[in-house]
Amino acid sequence: MPMTYEEAVAYLDGFVNYERAPMDAAKRGAMDLGRIRELAGLLGNPHLKYPTIHIAGTKGKGSACAFAASILGAAGLKVGLYTSPHLEDLRERIVEGGKKIAKPSFAMLLELCKPYLEEMRKRPEGTRRPTYFEIMTHLGFLYFAARKVDVAVIEVGMGGRLDATNIVEPDACGITNISYDHQAVLGDTLELIAREKAGILKQNVPCVSAPQRPEVMETLQDRANKAMTSIEFVGRDLSLAVVPRKAGDDYANLKGCIAVLAGKDWQAKAELALIGRHQAENWGVAVRAADHFYRKRYGKPLPEAAIEKGSKEVYWPGRLEEIPRVRNPRESARVFLDGAHNEHSIETVLTELRGLLPGRQRIVALFACAKDKDAAAMLKALARHADGVVFTSSGNPRGNDPEALAAMWKDATGKEASARKDLTEALGKADREAGPGGIVLATGSLYLVGALKCLLSKR
């Protein structure tokens, strides 16, 4: 009997999953791309059967991938999109033409991989077996090959140099903003983290980077020189102009900005569907990388109409996403979700949200984060910009205990904060604290965003 989708997911769950059990430096040190290349070879190297765009970064890389895929799709191409983690459905990670991989296709591809995975499981103790993420990556590669995509946009999972996706041979690369995250694995300085991200650079493959801190820019430029490739920085080689569009006095939905990216003899302009100036920077990385790819494959610039259409129609949930509510927003709080999970991204999201709102609404954060994240730094950002906070749990085994977070908050600010492990109770508490016309911002973890989307969709 063929494997069912449910059986396929259960089988996949039997492999080590570092999204649920934190990886330490020792485990990271034991990793290399040998097993990844071996498995890819056994499967016929599907990742080499279509062109790719490869995007890394600490934050914003998923948004950049979504922009690139949407723009190239608007240009009439058949586009694959591989991202992680998912919010509600595992199949969100493997998308073609804007549609998730079908359950029968997922099961069939995993069944194809199973004999090779079982053989690898039988190897001597101490031999590294494929992980959950590595297997998912190969399923994506296989699916895009089977669908005969014109291009696949591939998001790095973590780091870059040793990431399972780094066996691709891309036509263009992108690096979004680099800041502190996964320090126990990637290094405790921005220079070390940047070196890991720069591991995706390949000889003669152009790279586009978002604006970076000076030490990060210097590291990326050095690694590009050593890789014998070019790198353009938004803000240095490419100018970015952003025209924000505030919500009206009628409390209308927030809107994305209008962005213009310009380089030598080249310009792109579009109205963005995603909200915030930081999304304009992600868009800049995406549109320039997509243009590099398009010129290489088709010998001409990316069509302006495709840039405009793809940028305006992109959909990428969980990034300053407002969840519609049945009740009148003037009588209850509005709920926004954002997967920001380090100090810089929390600061950015709250600043953007505050700046786009028509008045001085009360903002209460509904917060959860993983144990391996710098919770203390994120709490500092919340203390600077939020009017209150309610701590909760995303349900992920890696998550911090809400009571422990509340204790950290009191130590840091001297203020009491509510802790509710039950997400429904936590949302209700945050709603009441924000008050009529206020804002609840669920943040700190994409897993929290996913759990909330699941909860609210059931309602």
Image (cartoon, grey):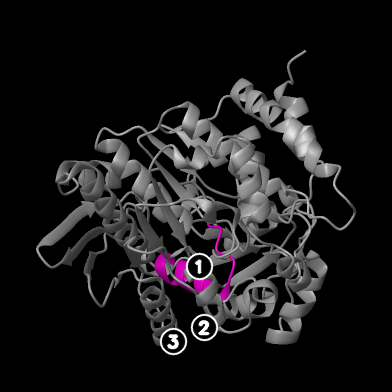
State left or right for residue 278 relative to residue 433: left
Q: Nearer the viewer, mark 1 or mark 3?
A: 1
Q: Is residue 34 magenta?
A: no
Q: Residue at x 61, y 35 (%)?
A: 43
Quadrant housing residue 398? bottom right
- Which label number is shown at residue 350? none
Looking at the picture, which amino acid does disc 3 mark? Glu
Q: Which residue is mark 3?
A: 215
CA neighbours of label 1 inside 10 A, class few (<14), some (14 to 19), many (20+)? some
Q: Are marks 3 and 2 in contact (CB under 8 Å)?
A: yes
CA neighbours of label 2 inside 10 A, class few (<14), some (14 to 19), many (20+)? some
Q: Is residue 345 magenta?
A: yes
Nearest to N terminus: mark 3 or mark 2: 2
The quadrant the C terminus occupies is: top right
Q: Position of residue 276 (x, y in %)?
A: 37, 62
Quadrant housing residue 77? top left
Quadrant housing residue 23? bottom right
Looking at the picture, tell me which residue is in the foreground, 194 or 311: 194
Q: Nearer the viewer, mark 1 or mark 2?
A: 1
Up-down relation of residue 216 to residue 368 (above or below): below
Q: Position of residue 330 (x, y in %)?
A: 46, 51
- Which label number is shown at residue 199? 1
State left or right for residue 300 relative to residue 435: left
Tag 3 secondary structure: helix
Q: Are marks 1 and 3 in contact (CB under 8 Å)?
A: no
Nearest to N terminus: mark 1 or mark 2: 2
Q: Are marks 1 and 2 in contact (CB under 8 Å)?
A: no
Magenta segment range? 338-353
